[in-house]
Image: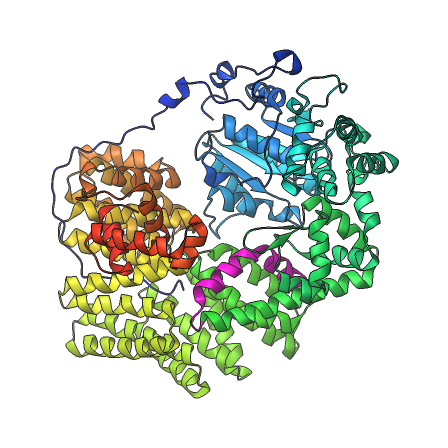
Amino acid sequence: MGERCCFLPDVPNRFAKSDKVLKPTNLEDWNSPPMVHGYKGGDQRHNPKPEIQLLPLLKLRFAGYVVSAKNLPSQPTSFIGREHELAEISRLLNEPSCRILTLVGPGGIGKTQLAIETARQFGKPDTTFFLPFQALTSSEFMVSIIGEVIGVQFSPIGEPEEQLLDYLYNKSFLLIADNLEHLVDGAPLLAKIVAHAPEVKIIATSRERLNLREEWVFDVEGLQIPANTNDLDIEHFSAVALFLHHARRMNAKLVFTPTQVEAIIRICRAVDGMPLALELASAWVRTLPVEDIASEIERSLDILTAPARNSEPRHQSIRAAFEPTWNRLSEEERHIFAKLSVFRGGFTREATERVARASLQTLSSLVDKSLVQTDASGRYDVHNLLRQYAEEQLDNTHDEAAHTHDLHCHYYSVFLEQCWERITGSDIKQAFIEIESDLSNIRTAWAWAIHRHRRDDIEKALNCLCFFYDERGRYQEGEQIFARAAAAFEGDSAEAVRMRAKIQLRQGALCHTAESLDKGTALLRDCISTLRQYDLQAELAFGLRRLALNLSDNKLALSEVKVCLDESFTIFSKLGLGWEIAHALHWLSIYYLREYEIHRLPNMLELGEEYARKSLSHYQKLDNHWGIATVSLNLSDVAAFRDDYNLCRQYVEKALVFCQEIGSFWGTSSALWQLGTLAYEQRDYVRARRYVAQGLQTSLDYGVARINFYLLNQQQLAVRILLEQGELQKAYELIGMLSKQRQKAALSQQNHEAFTLFDQLEQSVPPHLLAAFQHGQDHDADITTQNIITYFSDDEAQATELPEPLTAREGEVLRLLAAGLSNPEIAQRLVISAGTVKAHSSRIYAKLGVHNRVQAVSEANRLGLL
């Protein structure tokens, strides 16, 4: 919960020589031309836009930009055609003066898919990023979204926009800024980015121009349409191919007569090859002949309803495709569909019943009419364009709209309240999965609760939201949402003061990066004073525990830490709150272990172990894996202090499995650091380096603020390993980078024990390493971290050969086992039977020489198989 810094006794430096070098990325694959989406077979004369050789384009300025799947969203429909557009966009992006290219066209024309396909074909791994702006309600969040996607770790010191621009200054990124039409007032941010970052290019998608001086506009038109039915191989035309593709998804046995083919061409023409309209039209084949579909679209073609400043009016609406569907809906269906517009990022069937009062029959009808989509997990969603149309209908009835938003807000506040019960019980993993799935809805509901001052809904959400943001390492976003909520409750009334204190208590708790710790401590102290005044006991106990955490992490006022923890434990005990009692015992254990670390008094170690075991007993009764993992780390410290490193490793490996299964940033990071430290102490540098790389990657994967306690642990260990293995130049480059980051954030030695080591090294830099130290100060922190990960992972000696290697399928099963999936869940994911999963697991255990899942994951980590 962001409440843990593991520790082991200091290990003296030992130096060994290593001639390891960092190798540049291999770009040989770019010597081969890319695959081009084109038509297969057929006479060339039936394809008026022949395939285009794109290799020469890749060798221009835009050269080097294929994209890793992790940075681009998967698309629900196939990408068909657009060869000419892809080539033209590539040509424009090669123009040095083309820095912002806006793909302009009406909703549903395929701008997003075209932008993503451009990135897939012409992008560069790990430097192309998709910015999903469609869920934003205000341009003020654009900086946050961009930062979260590209991995900026914002500091509370300074303006986020300035930090974003500084971060992008020396980057060679391709940014896909998707769905900007409702954020046009935020478009100047894009101009600032390209002005400040000379190597950044932006592809924007919008239904209207952004009206920037730097902007180049590319009009996205419909898919390719046959001139007449005399053309052979008619399916080679992309508009027809797309319609038939979707129609056959509705009914795989469809066979069309020549008359029906002519009607299909009429449909393509009626919607001007608009992809979303073709998809909607194809869904009607279940209930209408294609001739009737064509006639309906032609009678209600209303494509000129949304004029925009930068494209032809006929390209600005999809009403010609949507209104026939809307007109066929019953009053009940219209009413329900309009209400579904309040959801963001998908929704569950239960949510539709509670918020929109939708029956299963109505919901199924909307799914059949392609107004609502459903995925394999059972979640529903509405295409953003259709959602916007439905939202217009809902907004026409102001009172109904407000009431629906109230219901949406209340539903997700109750959802979070129920998730808190599951988190403090035995269902934390699934609760976290569901929160993550509905985070867009939760953000929307929270914003509405603040806007309407819905105190009850805010209070229901407080505990769960704070814990979730803390565990996921999303400290900055969490701190910001609570700060905005606190600001909404101004005034000196008792009610406002109490509400503000409850909210700021969570804000202070999430000030958990090295830069914000002092701010958090001040907030917590102020809130504790207010909570005492109003006798809010549960809130007071929580605040005391979090204040103790801050003081303990800062290595300050350990006597005050003990007073806070004792009072917190007493209050929780009186209230009979089981999970909170266990957590208070856990922190009393940490207090005594830290006292033992300083004073080496045997009774302190015994008390630390006693409180840890009491805490573990409480968590085991609750079957709470998070708590079991947390206390296992305490017990690993006890074992380490007693020099029982085998037992220490067992505790840490158990904690790591649980933390990875839950998705706990701090727990995963702490466990990996402690495993790395154990390996370092035993001079197993191959394993130590591997654990450091995994720990650093954890921080990057979670997008945690750059200077945080867990990242500092890994960086400190990396420095020790480099020094001990004689890689002095790399060690001092890293020290130089860390020194600059600390100066920039105005951090002092007291903030983390790692700075003690760095201070000692900085004060006595050997003359022959001064250049390396100074060079490191110019390094980008993220790039340096990624280089360490690559360097520490690229060790030929680290992969121990198995007597019999795992098959590809066994490797898949092993990774899912490590992710915490059950056998039935793995079976569903891989589309195999549970018995087959069990057979694979048995073979994996045999090859690894282990007997159960925990041992398998531990051994796989040791061997670098994960």
The answer to which quarter of the image holds residue 26 is top left
User: Which sits in the foreground, 524 or 73?
Assistant: 73
Please name the predominant secondary structure of the magenta segment in the image.
helix
Q: Quadrant of the N terminus?
A: bottom left
Q: Is residue 204 above or below residue 486?
A: above
Residue 490 at x, y percent in the picture? 65, 68
* Magenta-colored stretch includes residue 709: no
The front one of 217 and 121 is 121
Residue 447 on the magenta span = yes
Left or right relative to 166: residue 261: right
Give the camera-side residue of 136 and 215. Answer: 136
Viewer-closest of 203 and 30: 30
Tell me which residue sits at (30%, 72%) in the image.
558
Q: What is the magenta range?
A: 424-451
In the displayed structure, 425 sits above or below 19; it is: below
Left or right, 299 with respect to 576, comes to: right
Q: Which residue lies furthest to the right in this view?
A: 299
Above or below, 556 relative to 190: below
Q: Which residue is drawn at 44% across and 81% down?
A: 577
Instruction: Provide residue 295's location: percent of width, then percent of height.
Output: 85, 35
Q: Is any part of residue 514 visible from this angle?
A: no
Residue 239 seen in render: yes
Q: Does 420 sit left or right of 372 as displayed? A: left
Q: Which residue lies furthest to the top in this view?
A: 45
Horizontal and vertical percent position of residue 528: 48, 76
Labels in figure, total: 0
Colouring method of the image: rainbow
Instruction: Please provide percent x and percent y for residue 513.
Output: 41, 57
